[in-house]
Amino acid sequence: MRFFRFLLVTFAALNLLLMPAAAQAARQFVDAAGRTVEIPDRIERVLAAGPPASVLLYVLAPEKMVGWVRSPSAAEKEFLAEPFRDLPETGRLTGRGNTANIEMVLSMKPDIIIDVGSIDPTYASLADRVQEQTGIPYVLIDGAFPRTPETLREVADVLGVKARGEELASYAGRTMEWQKETVADIAGDERPRVYYGRGPDGLETGSAGSINMEVLDVVGAANVAALAGSGGLSNVSIEQVLGWNPDVILTLSPDFQKSVMSDPTWANLKAVKEGRVYRAPTLPFGWFDSPPGVNRLIAVTWLTAILYPEKAEFDLRERTREFYRLFYQVELTDGQLDRLLADSAVR
Amino acid sequence: MMMTARDLAFGYRGTLVGEGVTLAVEAARVLCLMGPNGCGKTTLFRTLLGLLPPLAGRLELHGRPVMEFSRSEFARHVAYVPQAGSSYFPFSVTEVVTMARASRIGAFATPSAHDREIAQGALERLGLQHLASRPFTEISGGERQMTLIARALAQEAELVVMDEPTASLDFGNQAKVLDCINELRGSGLAIVLSTHDPGHAFACADSVALMKRGRIICEGTPQAAVTPETLRNLYGVEIAVEFMRGAGRNICAPALGRFRKE
Amino acid sequence: MSKGEALSGIGKQGRAARLRGVVPPVLLLIVVVLALFAGKYDVSPSDMALVVWSRLTGTPSGLDSTVETVVWNVRLPRVLAGLLVGASLAAAGAVYQGLFRNPLVSPDILGVSAGASLGAVGGIFFSLPVLAIQSMAFAGGLVAVALVYLVGSAVRGRDPILVLVLAGVAIGALLGACISLLKVLADPYNQLPAITFWLLGSLASITRADAFSILPAVLLGLAPMVLLRWRMNLMTLDEEEARALGMETGRLRLLLVAAATLMTAAAVSVSGIIGWVGLVMPHIARGLVGPDFGRLLPASLMLGGGYLVGVDALARTVAQIEVPLGILTAVIGAPFFLWLLASGRRGWQ
């Protein structure tokens, strides 16, 4: 009983002592979830809350990054610029794994935390919590692929790197417009039908509206598995894929790409017969699927090359080199290009 | 009359175990219930203790139907001594005996000094005070049984129901328990007990009831009710009932059948 | 032994018991102090003292405001929450072990964890704000146990305990299947990792508000346990024995299960699923202070709270990133428990 009362008194006393901390404000910013956040005028140190934010920060203002959400592997580092590729790992900040140590976040003293992704009430409330707990402004940015140019401009403005942002945003805008014009005259029912097979057996795929398939929609291709589920990943059976008979198969797994060409069960598919099975490159960031950030811009060019070969009157290699130079600030050698595009391009 | 049963039918919901039971339990008297395995003794005891509702007939304690009592009130009058199994947790003997005070103290109260004194007194009365701080799980079977009897004493009830108190006890402990029962009767308690050994009836009972398949087939004093004829009817084997001078009372022993020791 | 000695428990056994009884509060104090100083952000003892002093007196501390943020917004809420969650789980475990007469029972046996998990996973699946997710976890835990109780009392068995356990197993399995279904349907990029991490248990994002929000439920659940602490001992007897001693076992069981469930659901709603504490801590407490619930309850509270605070301090310092609590409590707790078993400590059976 006495212990019980002691507990009660202690908690009451602590409650009196604890008061919320106040943050210094400079300008107001309304983020994608409608939250009005006060952010400093000058921002020198930025923390990414998740992988898409990491990518965005790296392309816009790598000198302001305090770290990577996940440390790049040796293979990935080859395609990233020094010294940024050696920055420390900070972990994911909210919800999707929530592995970052708050005290470590605080010790890095970021001026702002940026989170790029889909916006829903869960992440809005998580943002509020972290902001209140740490006193660091936390902004949510809509990472939907079609608005990539706007996203680039918006965040560049926040970070104070308008010129760089404009450079990247206009490249993005031009690329997407060019792509639309290039395929504008292809009728709806002649659009390429694509199956995206994830996992080692290739039977996991994204259905309509899933974040993994955004790029397909933008380049005007049809996802054969659009009706296989709702908005997420779903497991399908080989019979379903045979029924859909896609024109092109995309995958991430090199094992699956090899096995599908030799497996008799898949042999009757149009895509396999025509050899149109491509692996999406992943270095330094995935071209097609994950992370769902601005890194997917290169996929617009790449998919045009492999899905619409008759329209591909451009040099994919040169375009890739250009993209990597502009966005990732690395010069690709021929050898690196070869490795990148090895199983990913029309032969 | 302390507790009376009139034409009592007992059993579980939907299953009749026994009927037509008429009994009377009086102060300073020991009633011994005897019968083969599965005759319904335990179910009858559960009914007498108010743990099962009677299926028909009347069962009254101090003139009131047993089902009308709250559990707490009933426990102030009737105590239950089950067979001493092993406890789940190592409570001390004192703690076990003190548990009897539950019906005497408030819902949120803990035992007072008075309660502890009563518990200690019960232990001393049965000569168990040397076991007071020993864990219940570490004393012998006989000592455990005696502890449960001490608990019934600490309950300060007038009627004690004992379910086979000598089962699985060695000879010496059996004798101790029987002595204890006699002493309790001497101090005015009413006792109802069941037993497997017909000889116990001669050791401590004032009246005996023989139960077979849920019905009382014979009752009376031990002299009248426990005879070779009634025992043969009850157990289905030949049992000799003879006075043993050394023990000072009748002893019962089965006459063994075909395979005899040569 | 004289009457006086027996009554007051003096003697070698009494002294040894008292010494063992001192272990939980001392351990708790040590662990809490160590945990307050553990963390990735460097806060020296003098800094800590300055921060506390400045709050108490209202004068500025002169330190970087981040230090204050770390102490008041990050570390203190985490230690507080760790205490509350650990204490709740251990107390609930002690109650359940007594009610089910089994030293190997954990608070999950009637499905509170499964229900809370379903509530939280549902909240994450429907993209609700964090407060709603926590509330759904809390409600889910309560509803699951209520359901088990309803089913258990509708079935007329001779052994009410066994019926409850079986109902708990069945409903727990059903809820588990629903959780699995939601996991399959969840968005694999945004929601599934969140679900997985929640199910592993963590105090990483605990705020001050979280710690204080569960306090009413924890206290509300603790109150009946404290009031009924002596009667709880009798609940460990056979059903018939307890009733024959004058106890309304059905009512008491309902009240105690409700109290334990309230505490567990409150704890789980902010911390996620953390196993092992509710199973092992009451066990160890019983080995130290005996089965009398009046001593077992405070010992369990202190050991449970201390253990979780200690493990959480490890979770946030041992690696670059946060280690989920549920993993650590098992990794540390299981070998320790095995060692205790092997060294043959008395008082388990």
Image: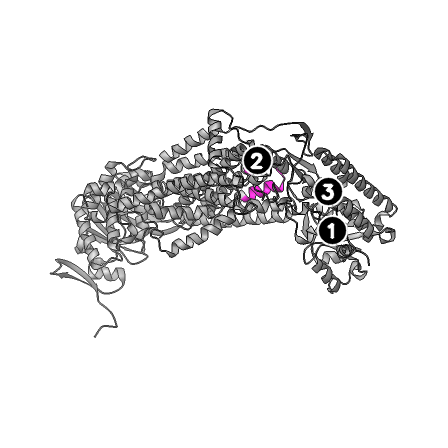
Q: Are marks 3 and 1 in contact (CB under 8 Å)?
A: no
Which residue in the structure is indicated by mark 1? A225
Q: In the rendered structure, which disc, 3 or 1, sits on the residue that comes first in sequence?
A: 3
* Residue A268 drawn above or below residue A44: below
Residue B154 appears left or right of A285: left
SS class, disc 3: helix
User: Which SS does the magenta portion mostly show?
Assistant: helix
* Residue C285 drawn above or below residue A46: below
Find residue C131 and name its label: 2
Q: Nearer the viewer, residue C11 or C184?
A: C11
Q: Position of residue A76 (x, y in %)?
A: 69, 51
Magenta-drawn segment? C117-134
Q: From where the camera sits, is residue B92 visible?
A: yes
SS class, disc 2: helix
Kind of residue sitting beneath label 1: Ala
Q: Write down the chain letter for disc 2.
A: C
Give the alpha-carbon distance from disc 3 to disc 1, as whole Å. Answer: 32 Å
Q: Position of residue A310 (x, y in %)?
A: 87, 53
Q: Write down the chain letter for disc 3.
A: A
Say whether residue C118 is magenta. Answer: yes
- Split into 4 quadrants, where in the image is the N terminus of chain B? top left
Residue B93 appears left or right of C59: left
Say whether residue B16 is magenta. Answer: no
Location of residue A44 by image quarter: top right
Which residue in the structure is indicated by mark 3? A59
